[in-house]
Every structure is written in structure tokens, then in C-alpha cells.
Amino acid sequence: MSDIALKKKAGETLRRLIKENYATQEEFAYDYGLEIRTVSRYINEGIKDSDKVEELAKFFNVPWFYFYGIES
Amino acid sequence: MTKAQRIEEYIKDCFEAFHLNYKEYYYFEFEEGNPEEILWADEKGKISVSAVEHASEILGISTENILACSKEARMKWLRKYPFFWCVPGYEYSYEKSFYAPGFEKLRLIERIFDSDLHEQYPVRFDYDDVVRRMIEKLKLQECVEPGSYHEGASIQQLQISTENFCSYDRIEEMTTSFIEMVKTATHLFFKALSEELCATEVEEYNLLVSVLGLRDKYYTRGYLYYNQLLKVKDFYKDLNEETFSGAIIFKHALNFKPWRYSEFICNKELVQSYLDVMPQAKAIMREYAMEVSRFNCVFVWSDAKPITFSPEEEKMLSDFNEIVGEEDIPVEQRARERSFVNIDKTPEELNGEEKTAETIISYCRPVKLGGLMVKMPHVDNDPLAMFKHINTLLGKVEHNNYIERIIDRNDNSGGASDE
């Protein structure tokens, strides 16, 4: 998978995790401490920064590679 | 000592006891060339009545008690809210966490001999080793992110920061007292909207406004002391518990950071009680836990390029400069791009703090994953909410904080405005 595809995959995973755990993206944004436009950017454009992916993985209690579609 | 001097000293002692910076809350006169001097007495040495009245509002102590330098009037609030007694220990515990054993002895010597031994404080971390690891990481990163490492260039303006957990045996008492302050301030705010407060309630409310920084969410120019609130109470009459946080904020409340302290983190019920009054702290706590686990390094490569923006952003910047009457800064004169890199702490550097960090992160997870519940503040869907608040409160709520007074004085003297 290319670099861009990986980053977009991370964004898609984030969208799914938010849907599983929150009623709205605004609730997640508030809980996590992000602006809603940043959340939208992560979901729509992908997450470029691997440090951010790692933080999100800790928050959702999943391994970091889960964000890139790798189950184990 | 004259009576005016005694009163001035009493007022300053009260500000210190309540941990209020009087230069922020109470700024009485401006003198050319000495903008921070506060005039407590007139040319004849008589105490300024308006200065005392203003201090009375901020401190929650009646003018009569201020003029009498009443210690009991001050002690009343210190007894009710042990939060104030706990501040020195709270601050010292945090400061100590950045230093190795030996720090306390040096601080004691400093106090006894009134000296400054700051340069000799034994630091907790080997920062030279952190820099070495940082350079190693940058070299590795160069493989996947070209431009991370600048061969031949030197590292300049390096700043390394981190956070620590610390220990304070009174943090639970301090937090419980803080929660009571927030709840009391909220209760008195609502009570004032519908009925007259008695003198004691007014004093308590005003003190809590000062300590917590209670103000309108959008109107930043003044705190909502009782007399100010009375002028605009109709504007807030429809507020309830649900909508309160959408209109009113406690500007200083997050200066109190109980999540730094392991005794607070270990008490899950207390953490939940705290988040019930400070829901916005949930995200901040999680970020703090992340900060504890790493060193944040910021620096500039000696051959770094000046900061540039996209063509659209450059145009926007240029248009903005034209509006405000500023010249565009040529690219070669701009600041150089900074580099940011995080270095994970080693197990020795963490010294067990990773467990506390993990506990905080578990609290901060979504509720469905076992995290603590917080109430999201009401969001006003009216796009003109900000303008409504400002238009209503402008001219009615006094500009009673330091920054706004500076702005007013600059405006009145025809000087440059910060607005």
C-alpha cells in the first residue's frame, strides 16, 4: 500500500472508531481535545503524522497498526 | 507606618493569601513612565476610597473590614476553602519533580541565606543523552522522511520540554475544596439572577469570581462581579444547568492541574467528581499523560529555510497586512522553519510513571471503552451568539481586568491599540 493510501486508511479507521464509540464526531472532538475541522480533515484527507496515529491508537485501545488495516 | 500604608499592606497580604495577582485584577492608576504603579493613597497620604472599594469587590471582604485590616474577615474564606492553604505545597511538589535528590537541600539553603542557587539545582534527566538520542532518531527518520536530518548543519535554539507526575498528600483535599468553589460560584450566579444576595453571599461570590475568573464566554473584557451581573442579569435569565457552560466560563480554573498528582489519579471517584465540574479537563489530562512519556524537542537547523506559505496563504497574508497597514516581510527576513521531534523516555527516566500515565489514558477513553463520562457543554447554534453577547454586555460590564485597562488607556491616550 502506498504512503498516501496508508494515511487515508488511517483516516477511514478513525471514522469507523468514532462511529462505534460516539454519537457524533463533535462529541469525539470534545473528548479528545481537537477542533471539529481537524477531525474532518483527518477523516477526509487521512492522517499524515504517525505520532498522531499512535496517540489515537492508545486512546481507542488498539495497536497502532490497526489504523492501517492490519489486524495483527 | 501610616494608616494608609497599613491598609495597603493588608490588601496586598490578602491578594497573596488568595493567590491573586493584584496587578491583573486591580489596576488603579496609570502614570507616565511607570505604568504598573498602583496609587493607594493621595498626595496627603490619605488612603484612596475607590482603591479600597475596588479591592473589596475583588477580595470578597467588605470595605469596613479592609479599613480595619480585619484578619478574621480574611480567615473566614481561608477556613472555608482549604484550597488556598494547599497552593504552596502543590506548587513545590511539581517543581521538585524536575530535579534530582539534593534539590530540597539547596532550596533550604537559598531560603536561609536569601541566595539564588538555581544554577546548581541537580536536574533529573541527562539532557545531553536526550540530544544524542534525538540526533539518532533524526538520522533514522531521514530514510522515511527526507529532510529530517541536515548533514553538516548544526542544531540551534534547542528547547527540550517534558512533564512529570508528582506527589502531594493534600491534593485530594485541595481538589475537593476546588470542586466546592466551582459549585458555590455556579449556585450563587443562578441565585443572583432571581433574588438579591445577602452581603456575605455577595462577598463570597465576588471572591470566587476573582479566583476562578468567572466571565462571559464571548465577552472577555470584564469579570462578572455581583454589581456587574446585576446590570446584565436579564440577559442570562433563561440560562439553566445545561446551557450555563455555553454562556459562562471559569477562565482561571484550568490553572489548577490536579492530574499532575498521583494521589488524585489513584482516586477514580474524585477524578469523576472533578470532571463533572471541569469536563474540558478530560482531553487536557490525556495530553498531559502523553507529555509525561516523552521529551518534546524544538530546534532550528542552521541551514533551515525561512518560513513560507502556499500561494493562497501568501496572498491572504499580504491582504491582511495591507488592511492593518503593515509591510509584507520579505521571505529572506522571516524566521526560519523550526523542527519538532519527540523522544520517548526510557524506563529509567519514566521511573514507574508509565503506570500513572496509562491510568489517565484509561480514564480519558470513550465511555464505551471504560472511560469516564463528561458532559459536553451546550453549544449555541445561533451563529450570531458571539455578537449578541458582546453587544449586550459592552458598556454595561466594566473593563475590570488588567489587559482590558491597558487597552482602554492606550485608546484614550491616542496610543496604539492592541485590538
Image: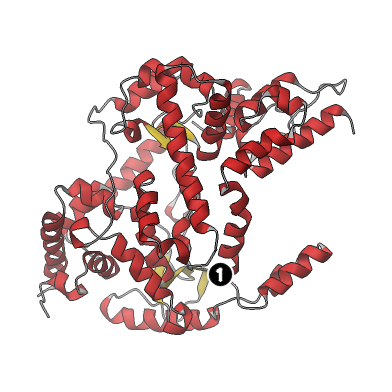
The residue lying toward the viewer, choosing from B380 and B128, is B380
Would residue B301 appear left or right of B31 to someone viewing this image? left
* Residue receiving disc 1: B97
Q: Residue at x 29, y 39 (%)?
A: B377
Would residue A47 appear left or right of B34 to someone viewing this image? left
Q: Residue at x 74, y 29 (%)?
A: B32
Chain ID of residue with mark 1: B
Would residue A39 appear left or right of B31 to someone viewing this image? left
Quadrant showing the N terminus of chain A: bottom left
**Residue B68 locus on image (x, y percent):** 77, 27
The residue lying toward the viewer, choosing from B196 and B10, is B196
**Residue B80 locus on image (x, y percent):** 57, 41
The residue lying toward the viewer, choosing from B368 and B296, is B368
Say which quarter of the image contains residue B405. Answer: top right
Note whether residue B416 is visible.
Answer: no
**Residue B35 locus on image (x, y percent):** 70, 33
For residue B53, above or below residue B176:
above
Note whether residue B247 is visible.
Answer: yes
Give the residue furthest to the right: B1
Q: Residue at x 10, y 72 (%)?
A: A69
The kind of residue tagged 1 is Ser
